[in-house]
Amino acid sequence: MKKDLILSKQLAILEKQEQKFLNQTDSEFIKSNFTPVVNKIQAKIPDKLQSTLDAAFYVGFHLVFEKGSSLIEKTYNKEKIDVAYDLHNYAIEKYMNKKHLKTLDKPSQHSKIINESIAAIEGGVLGLLGIGLPDIPLFLGVIVKTINEIALSYGFQYASDEEKAYLLYLICTAMSKEDQRKGYDQKIERLGQNIDAHTQINIDLEAVMKETSDLLSNTLLTAKFIQGLPLVGVIGGVVNPIMINKIGKYARIKYKKRYLLSKINTAPVAQS
């Protein structure tokens, strides 16, 4: 009974955080931080840049998923994260208290902070050099690295098409505008439930990659154009860690929610 109560309370707290994230108004974080520059530069953005950016993100995702997975895994110690999860999960199974549930969060928190720093350095340096579009595969690699490490921290692997689609929809939800955010979150909920229930799922990963690419390119149109201008590009590069923070925050909520629900759903039924 005590275990059920602790899990239910933790889930309620997490769902409040989830709703706060989903209900926040559009802050237009790119524009709000760089309004003076953006206002001057937006009129100069070529019309064809949108389609160019769509294609760049789509190709970037292909590179990351098809050729970059092994390279990304070299940037963190997967075995160490898996072992840490096993130890934390064992402690939770044995003792089930808030202390151990909080300890479970530490690797994902650490990962998010480190990857924000990587994104800041990578985006800032390339922005200083006036490199915008070629930065995209590197930046997507940092996003995927962040989500992969968070997933592992809560005991989830990411190699299947279903989990890759889940990762992509995490990005869509975190980066979408207010009127789209809850719709994407519902997709995430259904997909996560089906994956964890081992339900057969038909995933068109190509279509999900295209959808995510279009959404990201639309969100980052101005930032990536600015990043392609020497010196001024440093401002565009600052957007990268902001995105990592936003995506990482949402990913931590959703993977921990899946973890808690798995514990609740597998808890033994009390005998009458």
Image (cartoon, rainbow, N blue to C red):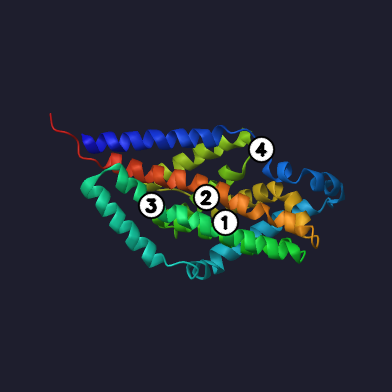
Secondary element at image label 1: helix
Please name the amino acid that badge 3 sits on: Tyr
* Mark 1–mark 3 distance (CA, rounded to whole Å): 20 Å
Q: Residue at x 79, y 54 (%)?
A: 49
- Label 1 vs 3, first from the N-terminus: 1
Whether residue 26 is situated above or below residue 230 in the rendered picture? above
Labels 1 and 4: the sequence-earlier one: 4
Question: Image check: 256 left or right of 94?
Answer: right
The residue tagged 3 is: 154
| Label annotation for residue 27 | 4
Q: Quadrant of the C terminus?
A: top left
The reply to whether discs 1 and 4 touch (Cβ–Cβ < 8 Å) is no
> Mark 1–mark 2 contact, CB under 8 Å?
yes
Q: Are marks 2 and 4 in contact (CB under 8 Å)?
A: no
Q: Position of residue 162 (x, y in %)?
A: 46, 52
Q: SS class of the residue under badge 2?
A: helix
Report which residue position mark 1 lands on: 116
In the image, 167 versus 239, the foreground residue is 239
Can you identify the residue that label 2 sits on?
248
Label 4 SS: loop
- 272 or 146: nearer the viewer: 146
Q: Of label 4 and label 3, which has the lower sequence position? A: 4
Looking at this view, is 250 or 268 the one in front? 250
Sequence-first tag of 2 and 4: 4
